[in-house]
Image (cartoon, rainbow, N blue to C red):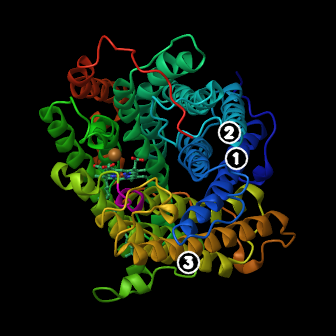
Amino acid sequence: MSTAATTVNHAATRDEAHVETDQQMWTIKGQLITSLAALGLGGFIGMFQAIERIQITLPPFGPFENYYQGLTFHGVLLAFVFTFGFANSFVSWTTMRGFGRPLRSNMLAQGSFWLLLGGTVLGAIILTLNEATVLFTFYAPMQAHSTFYLAAVFLVLSTWATLANIVLTYRAWRAEHPTEAVPLMGFVSITTYIMWGLASLGVAILVLGMLLPWSLGIMDNTDPQLGRTLFWLTGHAIVYFWLLPVYISWYMMIPKQVGGRLYSDGLTRFVFILFLLFSIPTGLHHQYTDPGIHEGMKSIHLLLTFVIFYPSLITAFTIMAALEHGGRRAGGKGLFGWVMALPWNNPAVVAQLLAMLVFTLGGVTGLVNASLTVNMVIHNTAFVPGHFHLTVGTAVALSVLGICYWFVPYLLQKPLFSPKLALWQAWLWAIGVLIFSRGQMSGGLDAQPRRTMLGEASYSLPGWEVANWLTAIGGVVMTISGLLFFVVMIGTFLNKRAETPEERGALDPPMPDPPIHDHRKSWKVFDRLGFWTLVAFILILIAYIPVLMLYLPAEFSSPGVRVW
Ligand code: HAS
Ligand code: CU
């Protein structure tokens, strides 16, 4: 373990030199590259799923033995590798900057990177061999090769290593600042990871206690229903582990990037505490149709799902206020003039503004899903992928691309290659996903099942044709957008051009100004992280003990099946 900033990176002339050590910055870059590689590959496979809807099956579906192998690749790479890698990279960096010191442990920083890479390579190998075509939810009794579960262990461990490092960094800071308010950027970083640390316990018990020993032959049978419940204990909260790193950007960087200021320090802390408390005890909203679970427990999870909707609503209003502040400072007048005055020529901002606009629809469709009775109409239909391409596929993914438009130039100290192309990329993604999700959702409302090779289905209903065409067209537009992103990234990497005088300062990160209502007005109780973690844990027990009691002691009665 070392805290010594023995060598410094490119930013030697800046005051952050002592914060960003070379030993740690390469892991931040490595995690980001792994994440973006997963995005590129996983996203590309997505196009073949989309055009399959209009009966076009092209290579590289070829190397895949079937549609579901490609779908598993797509889901695992995007839902786990892309998101975990980005979170590890970006939130490690915001932690360093937030607490104004390097991460506490080089070993954990490097371990986190190697675990991510190791898990990714193992997973990719076993998926390529078609030994783990179990989709990203890996429901038992479908049984993958043990290497698949091992890969999952590696990926989760990589996030735990980052979590441990963030907590140690916070404690080191606290030892030197016993009475100060936790710096806001440090606060949002650590609450994001503590939430995930608690949330991931479900899948850790599932994989280590059930699926891995079962796939290794140590246990003959498993208990699918207990497994599903443990999976969704993690599985809802994981969506906020994908989302919160992006919220960190929306709260911390976007106000600065649009020339405005965040409204309130205390409200921001409150939002992240709400996510810590209520992200996890909501998992049953993925299991409304599961038999055996009491309707009363499903209703409690439903109610808490409406509670966890609330911090995103606060976010909508508070970020809008910051945007309006920036727009008016830039000369925007009238009811909507400030919108036009936002920096629509800055791709880092535009990608995230469009991601926010699309997320309003993602949020609304989330409410549809969450409502127990309405859920019966859309559950297991194409409506659900419609919903999650608006959320993780855009609110998160398009924001990550936007963040990359300043973060990558900063990390490389090279100006962004072709901001114009980057702007095209952002708009094309937003347009593409709106077409795509419109197709998926209308298809879903017309009873189109999800996770089905519809181009081959013999039971198409009238109305599906339009839905399928929209899905295919939207998917292709998103792919073109994705390709543009990689052109811009590779162009930036190869860029030999120096920063022009007009661009001066463009290679500095957009560090936040204090909010209008700064930390002196915030409640001190928000900073009691140990206390909130305990409350979050108790809420999980209340929401889950009555459910898990139904399945305990577990009945390991189901042998593994291979349906592919
Ligand atoms: Fe969801 C299924 C409910 C959010 C992802 N969701 C899924 C699945 C995924 C997913 C992957 O209750 C499928 C899992 C599977 O494979 O089976 N979801 C919700 C609810 C929310 C929600 C209530 N989901 C997300 C997020 C995701 C995500 C975020 C990924 C990152 N979801 C469900 C339910 C299901 C489900 C059920 C199960 C369905 C079933 O039957 O299987 C809420 O958190 C949403 C809150 C969002 C808002 C929007 C706030 C808007 C903001 C932007 C403001 C705009 C501004 C723009 C400022 C309240 C913050 C201004 C710009 C200018 C230019 C002026
Ligand atoms: Cu959910």
Question: What residue sits right under mark 1 in the picture?
Answer: 34
Q: CA distance from mark 3 to mark 2?
A: 29 Å
- Span highlighted in magenta in the image: 381-386
Give percent across and percent down for residue 404: 63, 61
Count of numbered labels shown in the rendering: 3
Question: What residue sits right under mark 2 in the picture?
Answer: 120
For numbered disc 3, what is the local secondary structure? helix
Q: Is residue 505 above or below residue 277?
A: below
For the residues labelled 3 and 2, say whether their Cβ atoms are less than 8 Å apart. no
**Of label 2 and label 1, which has the lower sequence position?**
1
| Quarter in which the C terminus is drawn | top right
For numbered disc 1, what is the local secondary structure? helix
- Residue count near mark 2 (Cα–Cα under 10 Å), binned few <14, some 14–19, many ≥20: many
Amino acid at dot 1: Thr
Indicate the quadrant of ligand 1 in the picture. Answer: bottom left
Amino acid at dot 3: Leu
- In this image, 516 relative to 155: left or right? left
Q: Is residue 82 above or below residue 54?
A: above
Furthest residue to the right? 496
